[in-house]
């Protein structure tokens, strides 16, 4: 059962949009629009979606499913993408599925046989590091989404039995030298135009989720943004709750307030 | 104190204009001072130096006003925010690290929200027309901005550059 699927992601400065026929493990891209839109995704996402659908001679009512990149990335970008997707899916009465923005970026390297490190920009001097094994046209994720200072992330990769051989992601712009210094000359930096997700990558990550049986049930309400980092206020609340619970210091003792963590929410 | 003494609003505006000549994308200036001290005058000068065509007003109501100039000028006023998580709602972090210069008023409400590198300017009213502007720098870029601004402002009319604590007695 092949589904006409619209996918988009605005978690980075790149606005990534694609329309394609998707079945488990397989994607046929019909149309794609990937463009640089720093701080402009809100004004450009939906007009471009409308233009893309029209160019493909598709009306919104023809869509069978929506896929959205749910981060991690810019908080505001993730909110724009996820809320737009929820609005569309709800209005059209079609299933909504989330994919990790970092998974979509990794799909751009699926044709290689490499260990891939994706370094997303988390702002505030931090990064979203994620490690993937790419081979045979697929990408296997080796660790969940997390947030970290660049130095510990680079050090962890440098000390791992298997170090990444290629690095990508928009966190390299600010913190590339830290990773270069730790990982040495064995690692290759992808060129800058490969640091962000594409619409095609979103569809492929979703198709892989479908074949792995982890694409979720399509419920519009259960697709949540991946922030990985609690806001300061939520951290304060959590610390209070931990203290009230008798000082259990386990980080996961209290769930974040309605925010999907690395493993939370539906995929 | 390290900073400036200005005689009249035009001198404060000219300091802002001078600051525009040294800033680049990603720079942050955090302003504090009483109502009428000249925070808006300084920002007007900065905007003018960045070739912003429109008149700059206080963003107290809007929280963030964006001005397009030679570089974008992002002008925050955090006064009306109640909790630090509301900073995310106005894309505070993304804006600080974006493609322009940021001016942040009432940043002292959220000390944890200050970036690693920035310059702080506290404007004190010392007379009807005189102001004392105390600079504090944070991070290496903040230190560069502080020294470049001081160095570039010696010849501005109505502006006295103050570079040590010793001169403090006369006007304090």
Image (cartoon, rainbow, N blue to C red):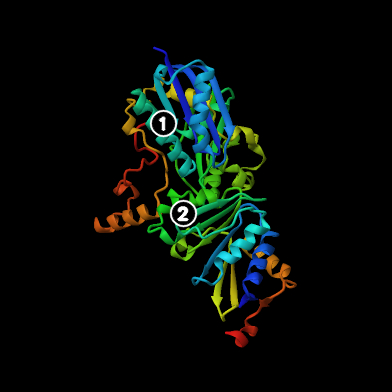
- Residue at the spot x=52%, y=22% of the render? A52
* Image quadrant containing the C terminus of chain A: top left
Res. B21 mark? none
Q: Which mark is residue A85?
A: 1
The relative height of residue B55 versus residue B11 in the rendered view (above or below) is above
The tag on residue B62 is 2
Query: Residue most toward the right?
Result: B155
Q: Is mark 1 on a helix, strand or loop?
A: helix
Comparing labels 1 and 2, the label whose residue is closer to the camera: 2
Q: Quadrant of residue B57?
A: bottom right
What is the crowding at mark 2: few (fewer than 14 residues within 10 Å), some, or many (at least 20)?
Answer: few
Could you say which is closer to the camera, residue B44 or residue A117?
B44
Residue A171 visible, this angle:
yes
- Residue B118 picture location, percent across and down: 58, 61
Q: What residue lies at 49% left-to-right and 23% top-to-bottom? A: A204
Q: Relative to A143, say whether B99 is above or below.
A: below
Q: Is residue A186 above or below residue A92?
A: below
Which of B145/B129 is in front?
Answer: B129
Q: In this view, does A141 lie to the left or right of A112?
A: left
- The Cα atoms of the two marked residues, 1 and 2, are separated by 27 Å
Residue B6, placed above or below residue A108: below
| Mark 1 burial class by Cα count in 10 Å: few <14, some 14-19, many 20+ | many
């Amino acid at each position: 059962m092949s589904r006409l699927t619209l996918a988009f992601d605005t978690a980075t400065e790149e606005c990534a949009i694609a329309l394609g026929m998707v079945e488990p493990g397989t994607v046929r891209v019909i149309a794609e629009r990937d463009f640089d839109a720093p701080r402009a995704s809100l004004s450009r996402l939906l007009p471009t979606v409308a233009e893309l659908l029209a160019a493909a001679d598709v009306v919104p009512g023809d869509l069978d499913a929506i896929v959205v990149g749910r981060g991690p990335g810019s908080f505001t970008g993730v909110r724009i993408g996820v809320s737009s997707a929820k609005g569309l899916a709800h209005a059209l009465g079609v299933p909504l599925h989330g994919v990790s923005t970092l998974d979509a970026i990794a799909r751009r390297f699926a044709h290689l046989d490499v260990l891939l490190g994706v370094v997303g920009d988390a702002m505030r001097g931090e990064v979203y590091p994620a490690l993937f094994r790419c081979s045979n046209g697929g990408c296997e994720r080796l660790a969940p989404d997390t947030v970290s200072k660049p130095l510990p992330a680079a050090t962890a990769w440098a000390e791992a039995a298997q170090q990444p051989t290629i690095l990508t992601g928009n966190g390299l712009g600010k913190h590339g030298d830290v990773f270069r210094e730790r990982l040495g000359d064995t690692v290759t930096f992808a060129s800058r135009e490969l640091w962000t997700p594409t619409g095609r990558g979103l569809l492929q990550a979703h198709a892989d989720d479908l074949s792995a049986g982890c694409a979720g049930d399509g419920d519009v309400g259960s697709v949540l943004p991946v922030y990985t980092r609690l806001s300061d206020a939520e951290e304060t609340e959590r610390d209070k709750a931990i203290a009230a619970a008798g000082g259990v210091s386990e980080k996961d003792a209290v769930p974040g307030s309605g925010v999907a963590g690395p493993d939370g929410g539906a995929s | 104190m390290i900073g400036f003494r200005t005689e009249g609003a035009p001198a404060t505006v000219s300091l802002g204009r001078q600051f525009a000549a040294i800033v680049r994308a990603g720079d942050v200036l955090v302003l504090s001072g009483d109502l009428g001290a000249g925070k808006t005058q300084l920002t007007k000068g900065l905007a003018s130096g960045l070739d912003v065509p429109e008149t700059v007003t206080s963003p107290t109501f809007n929280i963030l006003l964006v001005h397009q100039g030679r570089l974008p000028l992002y002008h925050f006023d955090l006064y009306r925010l109640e909790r630090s998580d509301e900073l995310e709602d106005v894309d505070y972090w993304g804006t600080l690290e974006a493609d322009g210069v940021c001016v942040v008023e009432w940043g002292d409400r959220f000390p944890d929200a200050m970036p690693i590198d920035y310059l702080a300017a506290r404007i004190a009213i010392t007379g009807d027309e005189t102001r004392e502007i105390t600079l504090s720098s944070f991070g290496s870029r903040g230190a560069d901005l502080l020294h470049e601004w001081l160095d570039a402002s010696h010849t501005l009319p109505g502006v006295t550059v103050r570079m040590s604590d010793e001169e403090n007695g006369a006007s304090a």
